[in-house]
Image: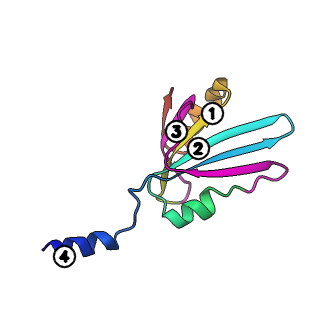
Amino acid sequence: MRLWLLALLSALPLFAQAEACVVHSQAARLDIKVCQQNRSIPPQLFREGFCQPQLQGQKVAVEFVEQCPIGSFGVCRSARVTGTPYQQDIHYYGVASDAAYLKPACEKQSQGVWMAR
């Protein structure tokens, strides 16, 4: 019976592994840092799609980490990715007053739960 369970578990996707990416984008008078913590996105899609933003006219740096760093002013938990069944937690760093815009977007567009830090 143990061998059967081991075979079953090894066939499942590794969604339970902690995986996150810190995305830092910069342009003239713009400096944004977010961290996307994967909840249910297939790992390869997360790394090659969700963590590779194409932001025209901006310098973008992406760092993969096990989990999002501390210090965010807010988190959109269980944010749904439009048009997919996937979820992620989005941590926001920088200007805390941006929460006035981010909280409604989190709750309405992403169907997430806003948590101020």
Disc 4 to disc 2: CB gap under 8 Å: no
- Between discs 2 and 3, the one toward the N terminus: 2
Q: Residue at x 58, y 61 (%)?
A: 47
Q: Quadrant of residue 90?
A: top right
Q: SS at mark 3?
A: strand
| Disc 3 target residue | 76
What's the CA distance linking mark 4 and mark 3? 40 Å
Decide whether residue 66 is among the magenta residues: yes
112 on left or right of 5: right
Decide whether residue 33 is among the magenta residues: no
What's the CA distance linking mark 4 and mark 2? 38 Å
| Disc 2 target residue | 35
In this rendered view, identify the residue nearer to me: 23 or 79. Answer: 23
Disc 1 to disc 3: CB gap under 8 Å: no
- Kind of residue at badge 4: Leu
67 on left or right of 5: right
- Between discs 1 and 2, the one toward the N terminus: 2
| Disc 1 target residue | 93
| Disc 4 target residue | 3
- Kind of residue at badge 3: Cys
Q: Residue at x 54, y 53 (%)?
A: 81
What's the CA distance linking mark 2 and mark 3? 10 Å
Q: SS at mark 4?
A: helix
Residue 39 at x, y percent in the picture: 45, 52
Disc 1 to disc 2: CB gap under 8 Å: yes
Q: Residues within 10 Å of mark 3 (few under 14, many from 20)?
A: many
- Kind of residue at badge 2: Cys
87 on left or right of 9: right
Q: SS at mark 2?
A: strand
- Residue furthest top in the image: 97
Q: Which residues are magenta?
A: 54-83
